[in-house]
Image: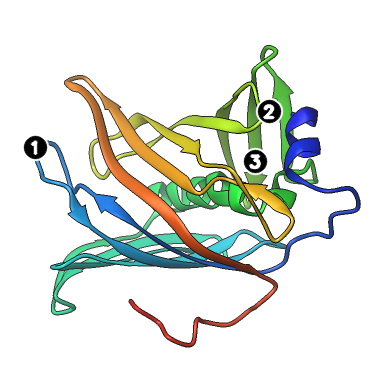
């Protein structure tokens, strides 16, 4: 973990406040479904956990968020018909996990603090624990030989199917804004019938310290 921070942050790195990013990539809605192209943009607060993600395919629009301790997911068809409108404790847990996992894009938020601790497992893995507003979430974090985070693993709710093992594979680390961050993420559920890879995103732009929406929003 110490080697990771020395690798991704420069000496005297200021704390990153407010993050906005865009990504492209592919998405799959379920087992047996085909990959579809997706565009997304996302806005984060870092002093307190919070984010808003919006994604769009040819037919679906989606909004994922964690705001003031509450998480939610809304999915619609052509901005007309609502397919999913998820709220409640399992979404609070799942969206807090999303914010924590995506902190790899603003890694000063992964430094130990009053909410966040690291626990050693072995020379290449550690447990990341985050406690916030009565919730405790965690990741098993695996590091590669370059001292980069290569994989995140946890247990989270998969819709109404209960807790499942969720993994994210991170790659394509590049220096952006003097911070070394991944530019590719592949997410998957580990199910009885096999591993369901459902998101393959590529970062296209990221800005720090700009607390406003993109001028030319594409979502």
Q: Which mark is residue 147?
A: 2
Residue found 65% across the figure and 17% down from its top: 124
Q: Which mark is residue 143?
A: none
User: Residue 150, image x and y in percent?
Assistant: 54, 30
Quick one: 74 or 19, which is closer to the camera?
A: 19
Q: Earlier in the sequence, mark 3 or mark 2?
A: 3
Residue found 50% across the figure and 38% down from its top: 171
Q: Residues within 10 Å of mark 2 (few under 14, many from 20)?
A: some
User: Residue 115, image x and y in percent?
Assistant: 73, 45
Q: Is residue 160 above or below residue 96?
A: above
Per the image, the residue denoted by label 3 is: 130
Q: Nearer the viewer, mark 3 or mark 2?
A: 2
Q: Earlier in the sequence, mark 1 or mark 2?
A: 1
Do residues under tags 3 and 2 come within 8 Å of each other at their CB atoms?
no
Quick one: 68 or 80, which is closer to the camera?
A: 80
Element under disc 3: strand
Q: CA distance from mark 1 to mark 3?
A: 34 Å
Q: Earlier in the sequence, mark 1 or mark 3?
A: 1
Which quarter of the image is occupied by the C terminus?
bottom left
Q: CA distance from mark 1 to mark 2?
A: 36 Å
Per the image, the residue denoted by label 1 is: 32
Q: Nearer the viewer, mark 1 or mark 3?
A: 1
Q: CA distance from mark 3 to mark 2?
A: 21 Å
Q: Residues within 10 Å of mark 1 (few under 14, many from 20)?
A: few
Q: Nearer the viewer, mark 1 or mark 2?
A: 2
In this rendering, the count of numbered labels is: 3
Residue found 69% across the figure and 48% down from its top: 107
Q: Is residue 110 above or below residue 190?
A: below
Element under disc 1: loop
User: Residue 154, image x and y in percent?
Assistant: 47, 30
Instruction: Place residue 112 in its image quadrant.
Output: top right
Left or right position of 171 against 85: right
């Amino acid at each position: 973990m110490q080697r990771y921070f020395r690798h991704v942050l420069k000496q005297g790195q200021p704390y990153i406040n407010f993050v906005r990013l865009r990504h492209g990539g592919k998405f799959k809605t379920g087992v047996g479904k085909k990959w579809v192209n997706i565009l997304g943009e996302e806005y984060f607060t870092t002093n307190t956990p919070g984010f808003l993600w919006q994604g769009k395919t040819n037919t679906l629009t989606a909004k994922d968020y964690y705001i003031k301790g509450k998480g939610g997911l809304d999915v619609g068809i052509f901005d007309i018909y609502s397919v999913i409108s998820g709220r409640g404790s399992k979404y609070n847990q799942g969206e807090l996990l999303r914010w924590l996992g995506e902190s790899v894009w603003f890694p000063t938020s992964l430094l130990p603090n009053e909410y966040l601790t690291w626990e050693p497992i072995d020379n290449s893995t550690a447990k990341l624990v985050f406690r916030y507003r009565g919730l405790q979430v965690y990741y098993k974090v695996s590091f590669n030989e370059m001292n980069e985070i290569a994989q995140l693993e946890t247990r989270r709710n998969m819709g109404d199917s209960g807790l499942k093992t969720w993994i994210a594979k991170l790659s394509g680390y590049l220096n952006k804004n003097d911070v070394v961050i991944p530019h590719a993420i592949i997410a998957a559920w580990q199910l009885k019938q096999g591993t369901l890879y459902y998101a393959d995103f590529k970062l296209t732009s990221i800005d720090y310290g700009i607390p406003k929406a993109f001028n030319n929003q594409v979502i």
